[in-house]
Image (cartoon, grey):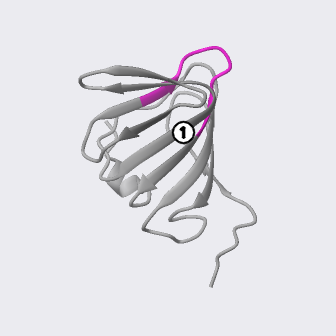
Amino acid sequence: MPTHIKSPSIIEAAGNKPKIIAEYFGRVNSKTNEISIAKMNSPEGWEEPGQTPEFDEFTFVIKGTLKVETKESEYLVNAGETILVEKDEWVRYSSPFNGGAEYIAICLPAFSVDTVHRD
């Protein structure tokens, strides 16, 4: 039977400034452990602590630029671009540029505070 999600759950985000996380599928909104799909709106100057998650994170940037740092590289992911950060890799996300960033994050398995392992 199909699952029709009419609205997301708004989840508090980690970081130095308020970021809006609208979870459509995931452990909170749909009680789904296998995948989470959320729309993020991060303001200019937002950054979160580094993390080493136990899930793969697929990110599609809709507007602005998302900065993605790993131990080896730094990526500027612009509107219309994507990035995959595989599980067990240290990563830090931020939106340091004018206008912030709007993006979709898909996590396999679903995001969990217990499995994100923030610094």
Please give left or right for residue 110 compared with residue 44 in the image: left
Q: Is residue 119 left or right of residue 13?
A: left
Residue 106 drawn in magenta: no
Q: Which span of residues is magenta-colored?
A: 93-103
* Residue at the outermost right position: 6
Quarter holding the C terminus is top left
Residue at mark 1: 60
Q: Is residue 42 above or below residue 27?
A: above
Residue at 52%, 46% in the rendered image: 105
98 relative to 3, above or below: above
Quarter of the rendering containing residue 34: bottom left
Q: Residue 109: give x, y in percent of width and height.
A: 38, 60
Classify mark 1: residues with Cα within 10 Å, few (<14), some (14-19) or many (20+). Answer: many
Residue sitting nearer the eye, 114 or 53: 53
**Amino acid type of the residue that numbered disc 1 sits on in the rendered structure:** Phe
Say which of 12 and 58 sits in front: 58
